[in-house]
Image (tube, rainbow, N blue to C red):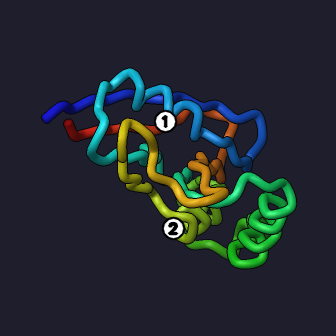
Amino acid sequence: MKSYRKELWFELPNRRGFVNITPDVEKSLRESGVSEGFVLVNAMHITASVFINDDESGLHRDYEKWLEELAPHEPLSQYLHNRTGEDNADAHLKRQIMGREVVVAITNGRLDLGPWEQVFYGEFDGRRRKRVLIKIIGD
């Protein structure tokens, strides 16, 4: 069995954003030489996410609106976490909703994604460097 590990680094200029990382995951798969197995992709920061969905700009705007309604950034005083001097309690909650990681099957050397499925990095407290881990195992 083979094992392959790679890190992706991001520093989004805005507080929130979504980045399609499917091409990066596919490139890592090619580099790994694995043709049958699994790939784990996970955000290595508590205010960022990795998720799978459609790459459609209207959906991304819907996510932004929905997440802000569920966990609004302001007023900052509404969150106990922000009493520690932070201003990102909402980002922790948004990450919890969107998830930490995804696992995708690898079949015949390709990501076994469904129609329209893409892998995304979700940022909820940007403007600083964060990483995503890609771990591939298989034969």
Residue at 32% x, 38% y: name it.
135
Q: Residue at x 68, y 42 (%)?
A: 19
Q: Nearer the viewer, residue 91 or 50?
A: 50
As drawn, the residue found furthest toward the front would be: 108
Secondary structure state at the residue bearing disc 2 = helix
Asked if residue 65 lies left or right of residue 107, the reply is right
Q: Give the x, y percent position of residue 108.
A: 36, 40
Tell me which amino acid carries mark 2: Gln
The residue to which callout 2 is attached is 96
Task: Farthest residue to the top: give it.
Answer: 31
Residue drawn 72% across the image and 70% down it: 67
**Rendered-image quadrant of the N terminus:** top left
Residue position marked by numbered label 1 in the rendering:
25
Quarter of the image for residue 83 reads bottom right
Front-lying residue, 3 or 115: 115
Crowd tier of the residue under label 1, counting other residues whose Cα lies within 10 Å: few below 14, some 14–19, many 20 or above: many
Looking at the picture, which amino acid does disc 1 mark? Val
Which of the labelled discs sits on residue 12, or is there none? Answer: none
Which tag, 2 or 1, sits closer to the chain's start?
1
